[in-house]
Amino acid sequence: MNRKVRVRFAPSPTGGLHLGGVRTVLFNYLFAKQQGGDFILRIEDTDQTRFVSGAEDYIFQTLEWCGLVPDESPKHGGPFAPYRQSERKAMYRQYAEQLVKDGYAYYAFDTPADLEAMRVDFKTTENPSPQYNQHIRTKMRNSLTLGDDEVKQLIGEGIPYVIRIKMPEHETVSFTDMIRGEVSFHTSQVDDKVLLKADGMPTYHLAVVVDDYLMQISHAFRGEEWLPSAPVHLLLWKYLGWQNAMPQWAHLPLILKPDGNGKLSKRDGDRLGFPVFAMDWTDPKTNETTIGFKERGFLPEAFVNLLAMLGWNDGTDQELFTLNELIQKFSMDRVHKGGAKFDYEKARWYNHEWIKKTEASILAPAVQSLLTEKNITVTNTTLLHTVINLVKERCTLLPDFIPQSIFFFEAPVQVDTDSIKPKWDEKKNLFFTELIRAYELSTLWEATDLEKEFKELAAANQLKPGELMLPFRIMLVGGKFGPGVFDIAALIGKEDTVGRIKHTLSLLAS
RNA sequence: GCCCGGUUCGUCUAUCGGCUAGGACAUCUCCCUUUCACGGAGGAAAGACGGGUUCGAUUCCCGUACCGGGUACCA
C-alpha cells in the first residue's frame, strides 16, 4: 500500500494550546514533511457547550509563530473542505444510521437522568463507575430492548435519542501502534460509546473516524490519553467497511508535571511560575491571561527544539536541532513510550543556546521592540547589532536584553553607589577626576587604548586597577554586570563615558 | 474497582544480551574572567523489586510494587 502521507492535528477550540498540543503538532508536521506529505489542521468543535471564541484564531497564530503551518485547514482551505466539524455536521448522521442498519449500533433513548440513575443503581465497591456496556444495555431503553414499532414511534414523536456503538461480546481488538507495537483490548471491557449525540452532532469517536477516512488520513498521531478508546475507533473503521484505508496509529507519551504526579496542566504553570501555553492566552469569559512561551521571551526555534526533545532523540548526543534537521532526522520509532516530566530549567537552557547561536540581525527586531517599550529609540542598527553580539551570551530569555543592553543607549537611571561607597576614598576620587581629563584629551577611542590609559593612570596614582574597575563599571552601567568595561566605554563614546563618570562623582560627593 | 500503558542518575535521556552503565540540565569543586555571564577541567549521582531464560541480563519472559492514562450525549 503506497499512498500519500497525510496527517492531521485535530484540536478542539476550547482555550490556549499547551506544550503537549504543540508537540503533537510538531510530530505530525515533522513526519509529514519528511515523507513529502501533507499536514492538515482540522477543528473538532463538536461540543458546542465548550466552544470558546478566539481559540481557533489563537491556534493559527501559534502554529504560525512555531513555523508549523498547515497545508490544509479552515483558514488555508483545501480539497477536503470544510475542515471544521461543526460545518460537517450533516455528513455524520448517515454513517451512524448505516451502522444501526448493519447491526453495529443502536438507538438509545435514555435521558441524562436515566443514565445517572443507572450509575447509582449499579454502583458497587468492585465497580465504582458502571458503564453502558453489553451487560447494562439489556436493562436500558434502547432499540435492542424495545420493539421495532415502539422505536419507530418514539423517533416519530421526536423523543431525543443517541446512537451508540454495539460492542461485540467476546472479541479481541488489536492493532500495531507505531510507538508501542502490538496493543490489544478485549471488547467485553469497552463500553457502548455514544456515536451521535441527541443534538445531532457526532462525538469524537464517530467524527474522527469519518473525517480521517474522508480526508484520506494515512497516519493518525494523538496523545496517549486516546489509547483506551482506540478499540472503538478500530471497530468503527471495520464496521464502516473502510478497514483497508485505516491510518497507522501512534499514541504519543504525555508531558507530565515537573513535581508530583499527573499530566501537565495550565495550573501547574501558574503554580510553579512557568508558561504552559505556547503564547499568551486570555480567557474571554474571565479575562484572565495565561502567559505563553512567546511572551516570556522564547525564540520559536528554541521552543520547537525543546518540544522535540521531550520524548524523542536521534540516538546521538546532539540536543540542538533546527526545524530542518528535525524534519530530516525524526522517526516515530525513536519516540518514547513513557511520559516525560517537564523541566523548565532545561527549557531555559535551550533558549539560551538558541540566543547564542542566532545572528544579531535576526535577534535585532525583537530586541529593538523590547527597548522601544522602555522608551529607547534605536536608530543606529550597526550599533544595535554590535551590542547584541556583545551581550547575547548572557541572555537566557529575550527580555534579558533590556538590562543587558539598555545602558548602551541611555545613562543608567539608578547607579549602585552603595557598592562603591565602602571603599571610596579621596585617592580614588582624584584618580577618576584625572581619568576624566585624560579621556577628554584622548584622540583614540578603542577599548584597548582606553584600557591602556586607565591602567597607566592607575599606576601613576599607585592604585591597583582591580580596585578601580568595579567603580568604573558601576559608573557606566549602573551595577555589577555587563560585558567588559572598556568595550562599553568604547561603544558609548567619549561624551557619555565622561558624563557618566562625572555624574557618579557628584553623587558620591553629596 | 476494572481496562490499557509505562518504569535507567533529582530531571530529560543513550544502551537494540557483553557495562568500567554514556551525554545533557540542575548541583558541587577548581580554572578563566579584577563585574555578571560565556567557556574549560573535574566530582557526586541511576537500571523499582522478586523469579525465571542465558555462559552472561539494564536489555528477553512472568509476577509484584509504584507511576500515568481511561472508565461522559468532553475532546
Image (cartoon, rainbow, N blue to C red):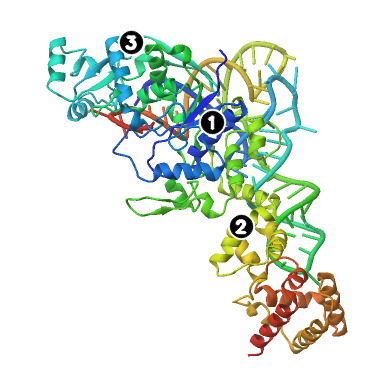
Indicate the amino acid at tag 1: Asn
Choose mark 1 or mark 2, whichever is in front: 2
Name the foreground residue: A334 vs A437: A437
> What whole-number distance in Å separates the C-alpha atoms at marks 1 and 2?
30 Å
**Residue A244 image position (x, y, % from top left):** 47, 12
> Residue at label 2?
A365
Quarter holding the C terminus of chain A is bottom right
Label 1 residue SS: helix
Choose mark 3 or mark 2, whichever is in front: 2
Image quadrant of residue A450? bottom right
Q: Please tell me which of labels 1 and 2 falls first in the chain.
A: 1
Indicate the amino acid at tag 3: Glu
Q: Residue at x 68, y 58 (%)?
A: A392
Q: Is residue A311 left or right of residue A50?
A: right
Query: Which circle marks residue A28 in the picture?
Result: 1
Q: Is residue A108 left or right of residue A453?
A: left
Query: Which circle marks residue A169 in the picture?
Result: 3
Indicate the amino acid at tag 2: Pro
Badge 1 and badge 2 in a common chain: yes
Asked if marks 3 and 1 touch (Cβ < 8 Å), the reply is no
**Residue A17 shows in the view:** no
